Amino acid sequence: GNHEFGWSKSFYPGTDSGGECGMVYKAYFPFAAQRATTETINPGSYQPWYSYNYGSVHVTVMSTEHDFTPSSEQYKWIEADLAGVDRSVTPWVLFAGHRPMYVSSKWEGDGVESKTLMEAVEPLLIAHKVDLAIWGHFHAYTRTCSVVNETCASSNGSEGHGVVHIVMGTAGYEATTQLKEPADQAKWVASAMSYEYGFVRLDFL
């Protein structure tokens, strides 16, 4: 996320990593990237996106701090990874990233980032019928309906395949004050709160 990779040349330039530029993350999680290695590399060439199978679930993890637009290496990797899922082995597909694609935030910056993700990445999630997307960054809990293009997909599928998105930002840091009030929530919000700490536990049957 931004606190691991935020630097002057990241996709969203900033100083949130405090100068770490992903190097500490890389030392702790050398496997969580393309060209997994423990040797020192230029943070600008590091590619922290990866996937793995866990039981009946295929998990695809992107980096929202690196270029994910359609001409990027990451986008091409995501597309190829999702296209290569064998549903007879892993019938469930879970997608994950840091900054959320769907977020019910009062802050304009969160909305700009989510729109960028929607435009670039959501078509891949829909095309490859991803079941669930999990995000962090925003310090609150939000769960969407099965949504596509900011519209809840109906049970008859007339809007096309939809993906449920969960923002799980309640793991310990102070809760945000930027969560929209209930009356201002978008129709795709199924549940939202920022007054309790917690974590997500998922059971796949």
Image: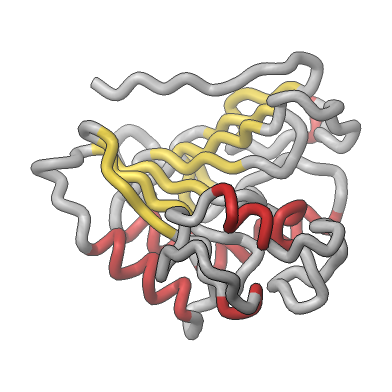
Residue closest to the far top: 196
Residue closest to the far bottom: 71
* Coloration mode: secondary structure
Residue closest to the far front: 39
Query: Residue 86: x and y, percent?
Result: 14, 51
Q: How many marks?
A: 0
- On screen, residue 53 above or below 30: above
Residue at (82% x, 75% y) in the render: 8
- On screen, residue 122 above or below 94: below
Q: Nearer the viewer, residue 149 or 172?
A: 172
Residue at (70% x, 61% y) in the render: 5
Q: Seen in the image, is 63 located left or right of residue 127?
A: right
- On screen, residue 27 above or below 185: below
Q: Seen in the image, is 194 located left or right of residue 71?
A: right
The picture quadrant where one finds residue 183 is top right
Q: Nearer the viewer, residue 141 or 127?
A: 141
Quarter of the image for the C terminus: give it.
Answer: top left
Residue at (62% x, 46% y) in the render: 102
Query: Residue 203: x and y, percent?
Result: 35, 19
Residue closest to the far right: 177
Q: Nearer the viewer, residue 187 or 71?
A: 71
Query: Residue 3: x and y, percent?
Result: 76, 52
Query: Residue 119: x and y, percent?
Result: 56, 68
The picture quadrant where one finds residue 116 is bottom right
